[in-house]
Image: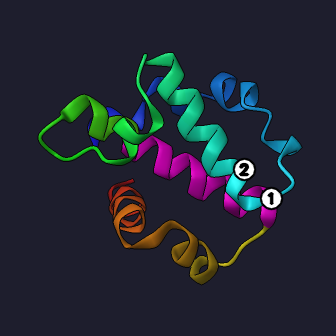
Amino acid sequence: MLKLRKHKYLDSEFIYSLNIDKCKYQYEIFEKVFKTIADENNLKWKDIYLATHRSVEKYTLLCVSSILIDKFLRTEFHLTVISRELLLGVRLNEIVRDYYKFI
């Protein structure tokens, strides 16, 4: 969790570069975040999405992606906690919960 607190992808410059305000649908946020982070790390989006604790760097990218997606669903689409939890699913939702408990 300490690695996540000051991760470069949680920086406002990176967030601005995603152009999330152009997303009309919620699934576009998932696509944009996973694809952008994967491309910048020479990975496929599936490599990040399927990451486990054993691969620390990829799992860190999964955590950052989950946090960003949750943030954008809240700010851009004004979704409630329950709606965001349903969209994120169990696995990603646990990551987000752990992050907010930590900070």
Q: Nearer the viewer, residue 30 or 82?
A: 30
Q: Is residue 80 left or right of residue 57?
A: right
Residue under the point 27% across and 43% down: 51
Residue name at image x 45 percent, y 71 percent: 89
Give the image location of residue 28, x and y in percent: 72, 50
Relative placement, left or right, of 2 versus 103 is left
Residue tagged 1: 25
| 72 over 18 or under it: above or below | below
Q: Mark 1: which amino acid?
A: Tyr
- Looking at numbered disc 2 in the image, what kind of residue is underneath it? Glu
Foreground residue, 15 or 86?
Answer: 86
Q: Tell me how the rendering is colored.
A: rainbow
Q: Dot 1, crowdedness within 10 Å: few (<14), some or many (≥20)?
A: few
Number of marks in picture: 2
Quadrant in the rendering for residue 4: top left
Classify 29 as above or below 39: below
Q: Residue furthest left?
A: 54
- Mark 2 neighbour density, 10 Å: few (under 14) some (14–19) many (20 or more): few
Q: Which residue is mark 2?
A: 28
Q: Give left or right: position of 92 versus 50.
A: right
Q: Is residue 94 above or below residue 10?
A: below
Q: Secondary structure at mark 2?
A: helix
Majority SS type along the magenta span: helix
Secondary element type, mark 1: loop
Would you say residue 65 sits in the magenta stretch?
A: yes
Q: Residue at x 29, y 33 (%)?
A: 58
Magenta part of the protein: which range?
62-77
Q: 7 left or right of 28?
A: left
Mark 1 touches mark 2? (CB < 8 Å): yes
Across and down, in percent, residue 39 comes to 52, 21
Membership of 69 in magenta stretch: yes
